[in-house]
């Protein structure tokens, strides 16, 4: 691997770590306002305009990560690799900096709000950390393949494993909150879970109860199977 590629990897890593620190600081400020005695469920009700700003902040975060991927990569696959690499580094160091600065989370099994688009994602901290490690592994394989001049086409089977795995993981994050909405509002009002202000109001009484580790683990296993299949095809059968 040449010095230029090493420099790009070092630069994107530094950028993602800095983003993780910035994200942690923003969350610390929000917790000082809404959770002065420490973050816990159920969530504190927040004004609708603040909730919308938080959604826009999450969108801006994704745009920033996409932008660094576009700048760092030379091909579509390499740009995708740097995007997911930065995403993984950012997410892990977000929790690292929260732990260093305020001592949270208490453990890897502490529940957290992970994302707000298209509705509320919840899960133990360990789950997104596993996803981040998976993303970093995928990115490393792609970047290494580019460096060695290997073919980058994943193939239909590998793509299918990744997509099905991602859907299983997504459902595991959304399942508990959606079941809570159905339990308290009924199936006929399920759209409230995706209704912005309505979802925020419902979440004010929501306490996570169960994370579907079986479905999540199946999704992760499918993605690692895809990584292994792609690695064998690109490096061991070339």
Image (tube, helix red, strand yellow):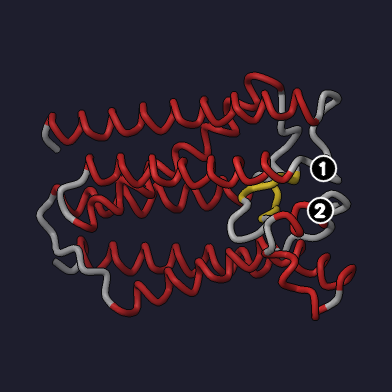
Q: Secondary structure at mark 1?
A: loop
Q: Residue at x 54, y 70 (%)?
A: 167
Q: Nearer the viewer, residue 224 or 47?
A: 47
Q: Residue at x 58, y 25 (%)?
A: 97
Location of residue 180 by image quarter: bottom right
Q: Quadrant of the C terminus?
A: bottom left
Location of residue 68 by image quarter: top left
Density class for disc 1 (Cα within 10 Å; few <14, some 14-19, many ≥20) is: some
Asked whether the residues under the numbered discs 1 and 2 touch, taking CB atoms below 8 Å apart as contact, a structural biologist would say: yes
| Residue 24 rendering spot, x and y as whole percentages | 59, 28
Q: Is residue 168 above or below residue 57?
A: below
Q: Earlier in the sequence, mark 1 or mark 2?
A: 1
Q: Which mark is residue 4?
A: none
Q: Which mark is residue 201?
A: 2
| Residue 132 rendering spot, x and y as whole percentages | 49, 47
Q: Which mark is residue 45?
A: 1
């Amino acid at each position: 691997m040449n010095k230029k590629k090493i420099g790009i990897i070092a630069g994107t890593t530094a950028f993602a770590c800095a983003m993780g620190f910035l994200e942690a600081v923003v969350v610390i400020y929000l917790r000082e306002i809404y959770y002065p005695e420490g973050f816990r469920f159920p969530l504190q009700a927040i004004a609708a305009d603040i909730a919308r700003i938080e959604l826009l902040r999450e969108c801006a975060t994704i745009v920033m990560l996409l932008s660094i991927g576009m700048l760092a990569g030379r091909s579509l696959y390499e740009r995708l690799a740097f995007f997911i690499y930065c995403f993984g580094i950012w997410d892990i160091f977000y929790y690292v900096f929260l732990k260093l600065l305020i001592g949270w989370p208490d453990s890897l099994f502490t529940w957290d709000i992970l994302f707000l688009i298209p509705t509320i994602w919840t899960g133990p901290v360990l789950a997104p950390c596993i996803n981040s490690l998976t993303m970093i592994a995928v990115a490393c394989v792609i970047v290494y393949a580019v460096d060695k001049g290997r073919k980058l086409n994943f193939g239909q089977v590998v793509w299918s494993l990744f997509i099905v795995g991602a859907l299983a993981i997504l459902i595991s994050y959304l399942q508990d909150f959606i079941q809570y909405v159905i339990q308290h509002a009924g199936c006929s009002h399920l759209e409230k879970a995706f209704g912005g202000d309505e979802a925020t109001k419902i979440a004010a009484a929501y306490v996570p109860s169960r994370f579907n580790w079986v479905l999540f683990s199946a999704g992760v296993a499918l993605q690692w199977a895809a990584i292994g299949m792609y690695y064998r095809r690109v490096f061991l059968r070339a």
